[in-house]
Amino acid sequence: MMVYIAYIILVFTVIQLLVALANLCFETNLPKTDYVPDVLVSVLIPARNEEENIGTLLDDLINQEYRNIEVVVFNDQSEDRTAEIVTEYTIRDKRISLLNSGGLPEGWLGKNFACHSLSGKAHGKYMLFLDADVRIGNNLIGRAAAFAMKHELGLISIFPKQIIINPGERITVPVMNYILISLLPLVLVRKLKYSSLSAANGQFMFFDKESYRTLGAHEMVKDDKAEDISIARIYRENGIKTACLLGDNSITCRMYTSFSDAVEGFSKNVIAFFGNSFVLAVLFWFATTFGFLFIAFSLSSALLFSYIIIYLVTRIIISAASRQSIFYNLLFIVPLQVSLGMFIYTAFINKNFKKFRWKGRNID
């Protein structure tokens, strides 16, 4: 039995290498283009206690080369200066407006209701939902609109390049891209419509408004903590084309600033990467953490050496595709695996034994 498990783990590791290699070599970034369509894009920003981020993002939007945009910020009962800062920007640029929350209806999660409310204020052909902590280059919106029109996409989602500064971030944040890039060949997300290829990141969701309103996207997932992946799955189940891309220097984000914040945040949606199956999540963690032990005790030294090389090369490829530090991602392999285990464990505890808290609210 040990021998069979060892061979399964070895084959799985080879598959991870091939998937990661495909994501490095094929078009997985938003391409540059000379063609820029002239359509209105509604940029919609849910914001709760974002006084440290919202001004910088609004500056990025004001400086976009693509000028045909409107910007609506939803102030989700912020307890800081978020609304005041946005109000100042509405005076500077008439394309910016502020929408204040009237309260969270029963049965909704905060961000999902914010996005749903924002969609009702959108006038554009396309709607771009952005998190307030995202930073974008000066032609990103035009490139996204051109890519959506060229490929007739109902949804584009981008995983921003993550800004990683302190040790707590280094041993947590790379886990997300390790899962994504080693399991999902992103080029097939756009070319095939299987719902099993669903992936998305709520930090950047670029929708065709017509398909969004036809499906009632955020309303369909009003109480879903991993609404981004669920929406992508709904789109694909309805035969609507989507694309999931990796970010470059034109879209960045510092998701978390501490280890505890990262554990709290990633535990909210880590299971969604595995089709909402705790069993698959645990099997992935177990195989990628302890696989070398099965191979070391069951197979030859040559196969063990091959496994180690394949495993390390896969990590290097994923780091390169993610534009992350290869040195640190190799140095912290063990802490990263411990963090993944903590994400899964915390998700299990939150789901079964206590409420999940996010930005001062309970999420049940």
Image (tube, rainbow, N blue to C red):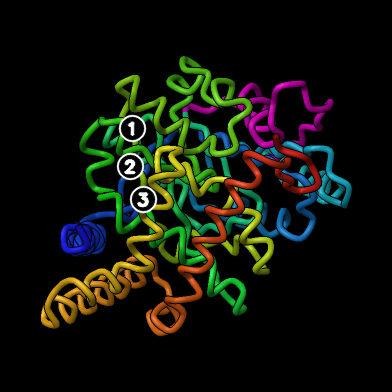
Q: Residues within 10 Å of mark 2 (few under 14, many from 20)?
A: many
Pointer 3 or 2: first along the chain: 2
**Rendered location of residue 63, percent (x, y):** 59, 56
Q: Residue 278, position in %: x, y?
A: 46, 44
Q: Nearer the viewer, residue 333 or 68?
A: 333
Q: Amino acid at mark 2?
A: Phe
Q: Secondary structure at mark 2?
A: helix
Q: Nearer the viewer, mark 1 or mark 2?
A: 1
* C-alpha gap between disc 3 and disc 2: 11 Å
Q: Secondary structure at mark 3?
A: strand
Magenta stretch in the rendered image: 96-125
Q: Which residue is mark 3?
A: 245
Few, some or many residues within 10 Å of mark 1 (<14, 14–19, 20+): some
Marks 2 and 1: in contact by CB < 8 Å?
Answer: yes
- The residue depicted at 38 percent of the width and 60 percent of the height is 286
Among numbered discs 1 and 2, the one appearing first in the sequence:
2
Q: Earlier in the sequence, mark 3 or mark 1?
A: 1
* Residue at 53% from the left image edge and 66% from the top image edge: 339
Write down the residue under mark 2. Answer: 147
- State the quadrant of the N terminus: bottom left
Residue drawn at point x = 77 percent, y = 39 percent:
362
Q: Which mark is residue 153?
A: 1
